[in-house]
Amino acid sequence: MTDNDPSALRKVYFEAWQKAQENIPLSALETIIVDIIQRHPEYHPIFDDPKNFHSLQDEKFQLDHNPFFHLALHVTVVEQVHANRPGGIRKMYDQLLKKIGDKTEVEHLIMGCLAKILKESFLRDETANEQLYLKSIRRLL
């Protein structure tokens, strides 16, 4: 998912959800996306009707109310944990999961850290600092 075209990225989510509804085999990425959407029933009405893609493909959402941005943060965190990159994130994720007991809540907490680091790096026009990101996750423990 490296395409910066919002419409193309949104299409990935719609297609993954539709494939799952039709019991069509999913790629690894699509499996992650479907799992995240399943854990967000508030988003089901968006994805249940494929016609919504055309009406939402160019929709401008407020960042804090953008379901696609929210899903993208989830996907990022899940992929980081799977790859253990930045190094140590998987261990902290597992510790948080043991402490909290709900993977969606754990991902939301880590997503908050990620969003803050991304915002700060954007404002400073610099690369996101992985060590500050990990430090902010460590504070959750």
Image (cartoon, rainbow, N blue to C red):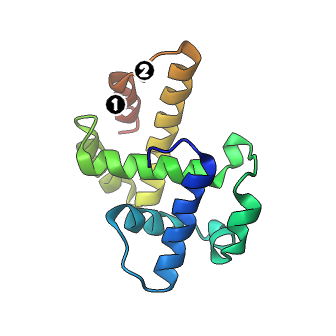
In this rendering, is residue 13 above or below 97?
Answer: below
Q: Residue drawn 59% across and 57% down? A: 10
Question: Which residue is situated farthest in the top direction here?
Answer: 124
Q: Residue drawn 28% across and 40% down? A: 89
Secondary structure of the residue carrying tag 2 is: loop
Determine crowd level at label 2: few under 14, some 14-19, many 20+ residues with C-alpha closer than 10 A: few
Residue 109, percent from left and from top: 47, 44
Displayed quadrant of residue 42: bottom right
Residue 24, percent from left and from top: 41, 82
Pointer 2 residue: 127
Which residue type does callout 1 highlight?
Answer: Leu
Q: Is residue 87 left or right of residue 17?
A: left
Residue 1, percent from left and from top: 44, 49
Residue 36 in view of the camera: yes
Residue 138, percent from left and from top: 34, 33
Earlier in the chain: of badge 1 and badge 2, it is: 2
Secondary structure of the residue carrying tag 1 is: helix
In this rendering, is residue 24 above or below 36?
Answer: below
Specify the label residue 42 is tagged with. none
Specify the quadrant that holds the C terminus: top left
Residue 96 in view of the camera: no
Return the residue nearer the eye: 114 or 5: 5
Which residue type does callout 2 highlight?
Answer: Thr
Q: Is residue 129 left or right of residue 48?
A: left
In this rendering, is residue 44 above or below 87?
Answer: below
Specify the label residue 134 is tagged with. 1
Q: Residue drawn 68% across and 41% down? A: 63
Determine crowd level at label 1: few under 14, some 14-19, many 20+ residues with C-alpha closer than 10 A: some
Marks 1 and 2 sit apart, C-alpha to C-alpha, by 15 Å
Q: Is residue 15 left or right of residue 93?
A: right
